Amino acid sequence: MTVAVRYQSRGGNTKAVAEAIAKAAGVTAKPIDAPLDEVVDILFVGGGVYAWTIDSSLKSYLENLNKDSVKSVAAFTTGGGMSMTDKIVEIVKGKGIDVCDKTLPIKMGVQNYQLFGGKGEAVLSEKKVDLINNFVKEIML
């Protein structure tokens, strides 16, 4: 099974989640500007929630996915309280790409967000890492 992880992150929270997903899946997380080098069975893809939606660069990335290159998508988002995994799912389904039933919205807040004085290095609690590991396990069954 070929797996890839792509993320959009402004402040570091989503990057940290993507890296934890990639570690659990045995691959390397890359930003959305990194091309997919091969056909992918499962693409874990996500981003942050900004002003009640996903970033325009993530939206554009999703709109340009090709169902011949990506067989299935597992969506994740980070945010202060709301999830936009449904937005990712909506766009991907509109492309004719299968979407995993389970999504992963992670509440992170702005504590590490660079624009608010953070270092952009999110620290994931053990509880969040367990949640991420279980998500990846369920998707890759």
Image (cartoon, rainbow, N blue to C red):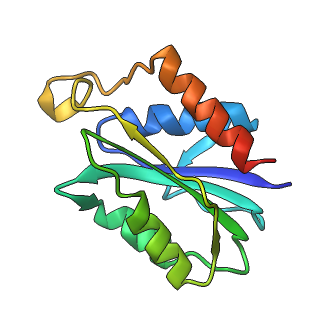
Q: Position of residue 89 (x, y in %)?
A: 49, 68
Q: Position of residue 87 (x, y in %)?
A: 38, 67
Above or below, comparing residue 124 to residue 104 in the picture: above
Above or below, comparing residue 80 to residue 123 in the picture: below
**Image side of residue 64 versus residue 82, left or right:** right
Answer whether residue 28 is visible to the viewer in this image.
no
Instruction: Count all numbered tags in the image, as a single digit.
Output: 0
Residue at the outermost left position: 116
Residue at the outermost front position: 101
Q: Quadrant of residue 60?
A: bottom left
**Image side of residue 82 versus residue 91, left or right:** left
At 70% from the left and 32% from the top, the residue drawn is 24
Q: Nearer the viewer, residue 47 or 127?
A: 127
Q: Quadrant of the N terminus?
A: bottom right
Answer whether residue 74 is visible to the viewer in this image.
yes
Q: Nearer the viewer, residue 19 or 138?
A: 138
**Image side of residue 126 versus residue 119, left or right:** right
**Image side of residue 102 versus residue 127, left or right:** right
Residue at the outermost right position: 1
Q: Position of residue 127 (x, y in %)?
A: 50, 20
Above or below, comparing residue 90 to residue 86 in the picture: below
At 76% from the left and 35% from the top, the residue drawn is 26
Above or below, comparing residue 139 to residue 72 in the picture: above
At 77% from the left and 68% from the top, the residue drawn is 39
